[in-house]
Image (cartoon, rainbow, N blue to C red):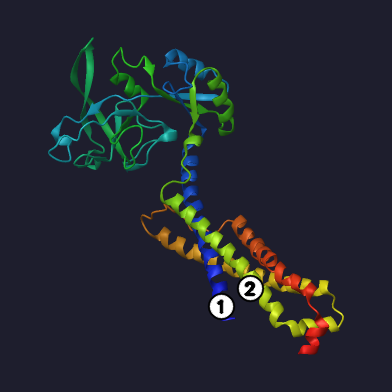
Amino acid sequence: MKTYSIGIIFAVLFTSLSVITLTFIEGSVQVDREKAEKLSALSLIEVTAYTPNAQINLDNQTLQIIQDTAGVAGIYPWYQRSLSLEDPATWPSENNPGEIPATPWIPELAPGIISGTVSPEGPGEGEIILPHNIVGGTTENLVGREIQVALQKEIAPGQGELVNIPMRVIATADNSVVGAAGPQPSYVSYETLETLASSSDYVNYSLAYVKVEDASQVLAVQNDLGQKGFGVTSLSEKMPTLHGLLRALQYFSYILLGLSIAMVMILGFLIGSSWVGHKSKELALLKMLGYSTKDLFVIVLGQLGMLGIILALLATAVSWAGSWTLSSYLVSQEDNFLGLTHVVFPAWNLLLLMLVLYPLVLILAGLVPALKIARFDMDRVFRDL
C-alpha cells in the first residue's frame, strides 16, 4: 500500500507540474498577444521590395496602387534619415554617442515611452523622440529641451555637408530591444522626415506598412496585393509565440505529462491486479450471492474509475493552487522572466483533460487484471479459504 501511495503522490505532482508549466507558457504568450492587440499591429501588412515573391518596386506611384486597393485604410512607408548629436552638451558622456537615425512614428508599431509624453497623433513637425539609452548613458535630461541634431544633407550630386537642425525633444523611447530600426532609433513625424530629406532622396522605398480597415480583412488584402506582384507578409504571421526558455519549458511540461500518464497506467495495472488478488474472498462471496462475472468486472473497473476521479480532482486542486501561488509571486516582482502581468490559472481544457484522462487511463490499465475475473473459479476459491 505504501508503494501505491508513493506512486499516487508522484503521479499527481508530475501532472500538476506539467499543467502549471503549460499555464505559465500560455500566460506569457497571452501577454504578447495583448500588447499586439492594444497596438493594433495585427491589422498591418508588411510590404517589401526585397523578397523572392516581390515583382514591383515601392515608390510613390506603386504606393498609390496599394492605397487604392479595397480594404486598405492607409500606408506607412518606412525609411530612415541619418541623424546624430554633434553638440557635446547633449552627450551623456565625453564620447560621441553615434547615430540616432530618424525613423517614422507609426502608432501601431510605436515603442514604449519612458520619459515625457506623446500625443495619440505622435510627434509634431520639428519634434523628436530620442532613444532613451545611448552610448554613454541616457537622454532623459534632454526631454523638454530644444537641441541641435546634425544631418548629412546633399547639396549637390556627390557632395554633402553637415547641417544642424533645431528640434524639440518631447520624450524618450524604450530601445532596450533592438529591431529593424537599429539600436538607437529616434522617432519623428512624416512631415519632419520630408524636411530632412534631400530633393533626390527616397524615390524608392524598401519597406512599407499597410494599414487594413479591419483585422479580419488582412488575408484578403494580403492575397490581393500578392496577386498584384507585391511582396507581402502580415505582422500576425511574424508574431513570436514560443521561443527560447518558453519552448524549453513547453518540452519539459510535455515530458512531465508523459511521465504522469505512464505512472497512472502502471498504477492502474498494479492496483487492479492487487485488488483482484487480495479481494478474491470478497469476489467469491459476491459470486456465491449471485453476482455475475460481468458484475464483478464492472465493480473492478468502477473502483479504478472512482480512484481516477479522486486523483484528477486532487491534481486539479494542486494545479490551481500552484498556479495561483507561483504566478502571484512572479507578478509581485518588478521584472519576471516570463513577463507575467497578472495572476494566471490553468485553462479549462487542461483541467478537463485531467478529469477525463485519469479515470480513462486507470480503467484501460485495469482491463487486464479485471479480465482475470472471467477465468476465476469462484467456487474453488471460496472452498480453499
* Any part of residue 302 in sight: no
User: Where is residue 379, by image quadrant?
Assistant: bottom right
* Any part of residue 303 in sight: yes
Question: Which residue occupies the foreground of this view, 190 or 119?
Answer: 190
Residue 353: image x %, image y %? Answer: 63, 58
Write the residue at 47% across / 57% down.
252
Query: Left of 286 or right of it: where is 183?
Result: left
Question: Which residue occupies the foreground of this view, 385 or 289?
Answer: 385
Question: Circle 2 sits on which residue?
Answer: 270
The answer to whether residue 243 is above or below residue 162 is: below
User: Where is residue 383, by image quadrant?
Assistant: bottom right
Mark 2 → mark 1, Cα distance in angstroms: 10 Å
The answer to whether residue 50 is above or below residue 23 is: above
Kind of residue at disc 2: Leu
Question: Circle 1 sits on which residue?
Answer: 3
Mark 2 surroundings within 10 Å by alpha-carbon count, few (fewer than 14), some (14 through 19), many (20 or more) = some
